[in-house]
Image (tube, rainbow, N blue to C red):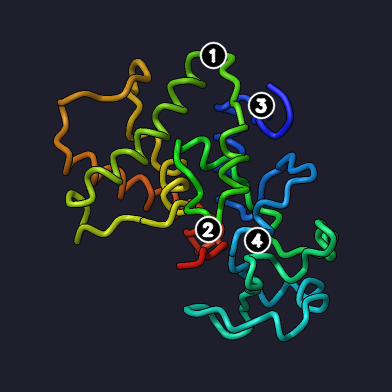
Amino acid sequence: MKGNDSELPAGDFSAWLRQTRNALRDGHGSDVACGDCTGCCSSSYFIHIAPNETEALRRIPAGALAPAPGRPEGHALMGYDSNGLCPMLSDGKCSIYANRPQTCRSYDCRVFTAAGIAAGNDAKKVINQRIKRWKFGYPTEQDRLEHLAVQAVAIFVREHAQCFPGGRVPTDPVQLAILGVKAYDVFLSRSNGKVPGHTRSDRDIANAVVEACRAFDRRSADSVVTHPIVTRA
């Protein structure tokens, strides 16, 4: 494959999964080979910036920031222009790359490839193209089974929303993909790594997904359990 359709190595799946789960727990982000891709900079994302990110806040014009809804005072959101571009994008590059927000450092579009879903609508077309290009490696059968399990969570949640408390499930692609990363083990048998069959009801599986996410979040150092990027409605 050539050009923009060429495959991009995403790493061995199980290794990526462990790294991503650790990154979600400690908030340090992932090591993503972005290259010259600016998909997340041009896809109508609101970017959360914490008050302790003083260098990022110093470099970003005050007019590009707004208080972050639902967050304590001092937390901000950086918006985008009428074309969906980050205001810090200049000549196709981040103008504050060395001081970019932690949200930008943490963003890893491979999570969509892992979950088998797109990042969103046409506003996310650049990222969606990137998602299609990522190719995970499977050095062991466990790598492949774990990838299937992450995808199984995303499929199950979308198809069985009525089984979850109040019918409330993530509709935002970022949150749905991360849910798959957090709860993938629900769809792995302890004995042979295969997706469980009809021995559990759909409601039992939904409850197991909820508890797996709660257990993951209890072990997390950060109390924020959703991805810090907020998408446009």
Which is nearer the N-term, disc 1 or disc 3? 3
Tell me the quadrant of the picture where the C terminus can be found. bottom left
Which is nearer the N-term, disc 4 or disc 1? 4
Tell me the quarter of the picture where residue 30 sits.
Answer: top right
Tell me the quarter of the picture where residue 116 sits.
Answer: top left
User: CA gap, disc 4 to disc 1?
Assistant: 32 Å
Residue type for callout 4: Thr
Which is nearer the N-term, disc 2 or disc 1? 1
Which is nearer the N-term, disc 4 or disc 2? 4
In the rendered structure, the answer to whether residue 143 lies left or right of residue 183 reads: right
Report helix, strand or loop for mark 2: loop
Q: Residue at x 40, y 34 (%)?
A: 151
Tell me the quarter of the picture where residue 189 sits.
Answer: top left
- Nearer mark to the viewer, of 1 and 3: 3
In the rendered structure, the answer to whether residue 14 lies left or right of residue 4 reads: left
In the rendered structure, the answer to whether residue 37 lies left or right of residue 97 reads: left
Q: Which residue is mark 2?
A: 227
Residue type for callout 1: Thr
Q: Which residue is mark 4?
A: 103
User: CA gap, disc 1 to disc 3?
Assistant: 20 Å
Tell me the quadrant of the picture where the N terminus can be found. top right
Structural crowding at the residue carrying mark 2, measured as other residues with C-alpha within 10 Å and reported as few (<14), some (14–19) or many (≥20): some
Q: Which mark is residue 140?
A: 1
Residue type for callout 3: Glu
- Where residue 174 sits in the image (x, y, percent)? 49, 52
- Where residue 31 sits in the image (x, y, percent)? 72, 42
Q: Which residue is mark 3?
A: 7
- Where residue 11 sits in the image (x, y, percent)? 65, 27
52 shown above or below 180 = below
- Nearer mark to the viewer, of 4 and 3: 3
Q: Are marks 2 and 1 in contact (CB under 8 Å)?
A: no
- Where residue 46 sits in the image (x, y, percent)? 59, 68
